[in-house]
Image (tube, grey):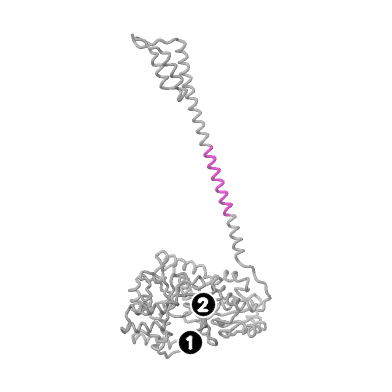
Amino acid sequence: MEKGPYSLSCNKLGSGGLEGADADEKEKPCFEKIKPNKYYVVMKGEKLRSLIINNVKADKLKGMLAAKSRSDMLKLWTVRAVALLLMWAVAVQMRLLGAAVGSTVLKLRSSYSLPPARIYKNNGYLMVSSNGGLNQMRSGICDMVAIARYLNVTLIVPELDNTSFWNDHSQFTDIFDVDYFIKSLRDEVKILKELPPAQKKKVESESLFSMPPVSWSNMTYYYNTVLPRIKEHGILHFTKTDARLANNGLPVEVQRLRCRANYRALRFAPDIQATAKKIVHVLRQRGPFLVLHLRYEMDMIAFSGCNEGCNEQEIDELTKMRYAYPWWKEKEIDSEKKRKDGLCPLTPEEVTLALRALDIDRRIQVYIAAGDIYKAEKRMTSLIAAYPNVVKKETLLDPEELKPFQNYSNRMAALDYYVSIESDFFVPSYGGNMAKVVEGHRRFLGYRKTILLDRKVLVDLIDQYKNGTLSWDAFSILVKEAHMNRMGNPAWRSVVRGKPKEEDYFYTNPQECLPQVARPSTNF
């Protein structure tokens, strides 16, 4: 006989319907109730109906569960979407709130970071005309701040020298951040950009009392001589500002205000600051760098009368230039004697020998902080051979980036000044104003390494090396020994009574503003 159809129904139930434990319970009755025969399977009618009904219910339940599952998933995704929208909205609100709070805090910090204005009885107005190059004027401006403060007068923002050899017509606002200068010192002295209208009218209608203050003066001179004149005239004009305060013998408060004006208040104008920072960034990306303040421009060589290494044609050219400028008083100069006395700028060749003898790594970048080197194609050969990574601002930046500063010697000098104080090493070849002021600034910033080449010792050792008296090893040892304590170390400023030009310049070593060091012993 043929097999009955009922076995198929049982098989369908076993393969479909409910899942898990419920499915197992339904399968067991099915197989237990079916009793296979040789020809067909026997099953009672009511059991069959129950099985069919159960099977139909299982299919319906399965469909219901599937539908419910889809509905739950839809609800879940809806909840997730709403939650994400809420989180995004909260984040936007927090960001806006943070920006508002941050702006308020920044304004509060900005206002609180600046000191409150000092209130005092104004004794009059001090106008000043700075003279000299950038760093000579810089020092003079700081002296004027201290003088104005202790005479209780109002200082008018100094005008810069536009009549010097460099013929730079930049004004204070072109070089320095004038607003910061005024605000950062307002707790000490009142500074105005120009005279008030009434005083300006007085100057225009009457003659302005002008005078050059006596060089290297102490505060007694300003109290007894200058202050009475300010009170008499209401407005006083200083025609010069260079070296108008003594190096020593001043109250410590005066000295510290000179430092504050120089190292805190005189911040470069934003465009100079940004460009200088970019130069430093480019240099830092490439590795450590040494700034060589190489005073070997044509005007410096002509002015000094030093012609070491120059041929007859070059000496004649430099001499003619020296005679062409009447304010360069010294005309006849013994170049050889001056060099032996250590009074000449070192030549590029002499600097190269000194750096090599001091074991300066030849891979270091050597940044030339100077103008155009005289006969550079010839005189720079040995330096470039010894230190291949010689760079300058013109090689580090695009021409367009330097265009706003070109033809303005003081602005270009400001770029070099900033790079100099940020360098790993600073090496001046001559003791000019920039060399002195940068040395002091680097001391103030934590005694950054400044190699102060002893020109008198060096030229003697170099001559001995060149004529064969000294071997290279002996020469190198002697150069190192001579400069062991000439690296910008903490030291006391030298004092020469009655001869301020022969003692250490205040801005070279502003010891009153630096961590104290032990005084040298006078016991022998």
Residue 90 lies in the magenta-colored region: yes
Looking at this view, name the residue that lies furthest to the bottom.
332
Kindly identify the amino acid type of the residue bearing the numbered disc 2: Asn
Callout 2: few (<14), some (14-19), or many (20+) C-alpha neighbours within 10 Å? many
Residue at point 59%, 63% (across, down): 110
The foreground one among 256 and 292 is 256
Q: Main secondary structure of the magenta part?
A: helix
Residue 227 lies in the magenta-colored region: no
Q: How far apart in space, not on screen, are marks 1 and 2 (Cα)?
A: 30 Å
Looking at this view, name the residue that lies furthest to the right.
121
Residue 51: % across, % down: 45, 15
Q: Earlier in the sequence, mark 1 or mark 2?
A: 1
Disc 1, SS: loop
Answer with the quarter of the image where residue 190 lies.
bottom right
The foreground one among 500 and 197 is 500
The residue that mark 2 highlights is 509
The residue that mark 1 highlights is 327
Q: For residue 21, which numbered disc appears in the image? A: none
The foreground one among 314 and 200 is 314
The stretch in magenta equals 79-99
Considering only vertical position in the picture, is 78 above or below 18? below
Kindly identify the amino acid type of the residue bearing the numbered disc 1: Trp
Residue 349: % across, % down: 36, 79
Looking at this view, name the residue that lies furthest to the front.
524
